[in-house]
Structures are given as structure tokens and as C-alpha cells.
Image (cartoon, grey):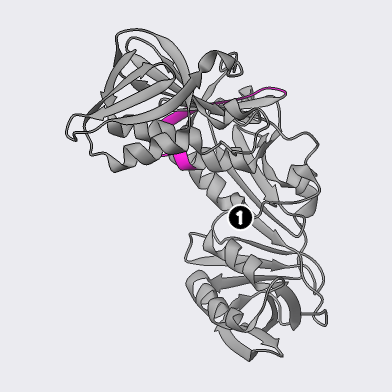
């Protein structure tokens, strides 16, 4: 086969495909990228058996065929070649690359693509969603997901069709939770609630840009069609906890805090905390928030911030400063609300103009070990 195409489009497709390959498979052929050659396009496919990705790119070929190759090596070669048209000739388990502007041959070993597992990319009822809207939702919750929880449902992002054409997205590691909701047309067609693995969500997040994309869920899989790339992923088995029961409804105090001032003060005080708790003490009294941290190794720090409080009661709470920082960074309003339910009860944070995004953080015992 003799193939002609733009280097930049091939490089992008190979990088997308190679991003899901773990390189630890017993069946080594899925450590490669599958390349399906048609007369006017290529399909670059990869899988780790949990997630599969396919990208179509325009090309010209004198025949059709199917091969696999090491995606990482192919990407390395393409990165070092200048932009422009490249030609690829395949013969006798070799892929020979030539650039239109560089004099040289680059020969990469290939294998027969017929042994690559068959992947089904069809049979989904898709709805259209705004890319930037969905990407914003992911960003607001992703930080709260677990990465190594013994409960698999916490190692992903929960997607739920809510009321009145809203899509809910939730992530939690059992010590904190982040929730966001957006109005999305046709979301009622998503009949299954599901937990999408973090690896899949991260790949989707990288691809989302502008315009719309197509999305679907069935009982076992989800599908994302973003531009010329399609992602099929398994769903995480198990039931996500009822997150609405975790979000407090009754408070002893509601605080209004300047977002930027809070983040800056917290960042300075956190210098005097240590992993893994990053413990700080927040004291609310008379429209003043005092943020403190102390460790025997480093010393101590404290700062005061003017706030608006709905109570004159003094409240002292121990909490993970990094969790506060992660939540505060995702608030895009000038000020935010912090709802207090008690010294040893969850704290909630949300923008001051909406309840469509909420962070919930569990407290730490003030006298607990650092």
C-alpha cells in the first residue's frame, strides 16, 4: 500500500490513540495502534479493552488494508519531521515513512491487523451536547474523584439525567464531594445513570473544544463522538451513593467570602501544613474568618479575612486545606457562600449566585494527629 497524507493530522490521531495504551497487556497486539487504510481515509484505533478510541483522518491510498504498529514510536518519528505531506509505504511487515521536505527513510515494524480484536463503535442513540459546557462541568467535579479507592464507583464521575432537562455530574472520594448541574436539551433521552471511569473522562476532557459533540449511554457502555474521534468505554459497575443525602440542607451559619482573598490567604497559611491532611483551623466570629495552621516541624501561621456572617456564634472547624483550595479554585464568582452545619459536620461551598455547583467537605478533628 502507498498512502499520502498530512503529517500533522496523522500525528494528532496517533497521539490520541496511543494515550489509552497501557503497554502491559498479555496480548501484545493491543499494545499497538491499529491502522485501517481506505482509499480516501485512515482509521487509527486503539484499546485497552476498557476504553477504545477511533480517529478518522483524510488520506489517499492506492489500495486498502489493515496493519498495526507501535504508536509511541510512530509518534516519535512524526514529531521530528517537518509539517507537510508524508508518504507511507507498507510491505513485508514494514512501514516506510518519507517526508516531502526531508531526504530520508524511516522503517517501522508492523504486524498483521487481522489479529487485532474486533471493536464495535455503533449502536448508540446519541444526543448533542455543547463541548465547552460539558468540559466546564467535568472541570468542576474532576478534582474530587478518587484515584485508588477500594470502592470502584468513586474512581469515576457519576452522570445523571436530572429534572427539567438538566444533566447532573458528581465526583467523590468519600471525604469530599463535588456536584454540578447544567440545562442540556434532549438529556431526557439518557435513561441510564452511570459512573464513567476517570481514564475515559480525562481522555474526553482533552478532546473537548468548541462546537457540539455526540454522547450516549447504554447499560454497559458510554460513547463520545467528538469531531472525527469516537470513544467507547465500559462503565463502572456498582451504584453511586445517593449524593443528595450527603449535601446538607440545614445550617447554623451562612458565610459570604471574597473568593480571591480566601484563596490567597489559604495558600499562604497552607505553607505551614503537611501531607496528607493539610490541616488548617477556621474560626468564624463577628464577621471575621481566622485561618490558622501549625506543625511542630515548620511553625505556625494565621490570617484574618473580613466576611459576612448570618450568625454571631463563634464556630471553629478543622479541615483539609487542600480540599478547600481545590473547591475554591473552581468557583468563578467574585465571592462565594460557605454553609456551616457544625464543628464536626460537612462544610459546603458554592458560588454566591447559584446552587447549581456545590462542594461538600468533611471536617477533621481539631485535636487529631497532623
Quadrant position of residue 252 = bottom right
Q: Is residue 281 above or below residue 158?
A: below
Q: Residue at x 16, y 34 (%)?
A: 101
Q: Residue at x 39, y 19 (%)?
A: 42
Task: Name the spot of residue 121 as percent of width and height, x first.
Answer: 56, 18
Q: Decide whether residue 208 is among the magenta residues.
A: yes
Q: Residue furthest top?
A: 63
Query: From the viewer's perspective, is 369 left or right of 22?
Result: right
Q: Is residue 90 above or below residue 179?
A: above
Q: Is residue 296 above or below residue 15?
A: below
Quadrant position of residue 125 = top right
Task: Name the spot of residue 316 as percent of width and height, x first.
Answer: 75, 81
- How packed is label 1: few (under 14 Cα within 10 Å), some, or many (20 or more)? some
Q: Residue at x 61, y 89 (%)?
A: 301
Q: Dividing the image into 4 quarters, which one contains the N terminus?
A: top left
Quadrant position of residue 321 = bottom right
Task: Name the spot of residue 93 as percent of width and height, x first.
Answer: 44, 19
Whether residue 45 is visible to the viewer of this picture, yes or no, is yes
Residue toward you, 122 or 167: 122
Q: Dividing the image into 4 quarters, which one contains the C terminus?
A: bottom right
Query: From the viewer's perspective, is 214 left or right of 279?
Result: left
Q: How many labels, in total?
A: 1
Q: Is residue 62 above or below residue 286?
A: above
Task: Name the spot of residue 138 as percent of width and height, x first.
Answer: 56, 45
Q: Which residues are magenta?
A: 206-219
Q: Decide whether residue 9 is among the magenta residues.
A: no
Q: Which residue is mark 1?
A: 143
Q: Residue at x 61, y 50 (%)?
A: 141
Amino acid at each position: 500500500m502507498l498512502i499520502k497524507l498530512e503529517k500533522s493530522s496523522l500525528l494528532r490521531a496517533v497521539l490520541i490513540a496511543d494515550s489509552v495504551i497501557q503497554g502491559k497487556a498479555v496480548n501484545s497486539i493491543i499494545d499497538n495502534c491499529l491502522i485501517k487504510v481506505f482509499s480516501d481515509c485512515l482509521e487509527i484505533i486503539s484499546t485497552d479493552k476498557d476504553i477504545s478510541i477511533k480517529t478518522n483522518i483524510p488520506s489517499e491510498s492506492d489500495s486498502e488494508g489493515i496493519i498495526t504498529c507501535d504508536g509511541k514510536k510512530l509518534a516519535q518519528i512524526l514529531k521530528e519531521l517537518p509539517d507537510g505531506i508524508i508518504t507511507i509505504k507498507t510491505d513485508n511487515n514494514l512501514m516506510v515513512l518519507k517526508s516531502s521536505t526531508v531526504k530520508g527513510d524511516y522503517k517501522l515494524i508492523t504486524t498483521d491487523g487481522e489479529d487485532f480484536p474486533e471493536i464495535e463503535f455503533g449502536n448508540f442513540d446519541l444526543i448533542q451536547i455543547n463541548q465547552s459546557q460539558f468540559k466546564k462541568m467535568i472541570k468542576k467535579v474532576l478534582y474530587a474523584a478518587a484515584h485508588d479507592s477500594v470502592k470502584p464507583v468513586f474512581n469515576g464521575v457519576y452522570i445523571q439525567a436530572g429534572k427539567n432537562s438538566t444533566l447532573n455530574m458528581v465526583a467523590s472520594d468519600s471525604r469530599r464531594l463535588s456536584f454540578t448541574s447544567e440545562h442540556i436539551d434532549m438529556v431526557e433521552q439518557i435513561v441510564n445513570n452511570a459512573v464513567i471511569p476517570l481514564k475515559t473522562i480525562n481522555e474526553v476532557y482533552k478532546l473537548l473544544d468548541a462546537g457540539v459533540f455526540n454522547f450516549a449511554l447504554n447499560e454497559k457502555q458510554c460513547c463520545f463522538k467528538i469531531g472525527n474521534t469516537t470513544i467507547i468505554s465500559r462503565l463502572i459497575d456498582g451504584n453511586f451513593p445517593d449524593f443528595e443525602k450527603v449535601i446538607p440542607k440545614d445550617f447554623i451559619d451562612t458565610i459570604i467570602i471574597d473568593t480571591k482573598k480566601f484563596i490567597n490567604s489559604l495558600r499562604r497559611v497552607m505553607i505551614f501544613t503537611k501531607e496528607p491532611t493539610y490541616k488548617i483551623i477556621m474560626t468564624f466570629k463577628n464577621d471575621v474568618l481566622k485561618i490558622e495552621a501549625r506543625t511542630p516541624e515548620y511553625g505556625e501561621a494565621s490570617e484574618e479575612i473580613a466576611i459576612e456572617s448570618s450568625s454571631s456564634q463563634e464556630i471553629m472547624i478543622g479541615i483539609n486545606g487542600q480540599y478547600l483550595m481545590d473547591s475554591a479554585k473552581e468557583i468563578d464568582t467574585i465571592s462565594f457562600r460557605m454553609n456551616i452545619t457544625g464543628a464536626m459536620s460537612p462544610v459546603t461551598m458554592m458560588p454566591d449566585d447559584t446552587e447549581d455547583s456545590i462542594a461538600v467537605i468533611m471536617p477533621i478533628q481539631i485535636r487529631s494527629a497532623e
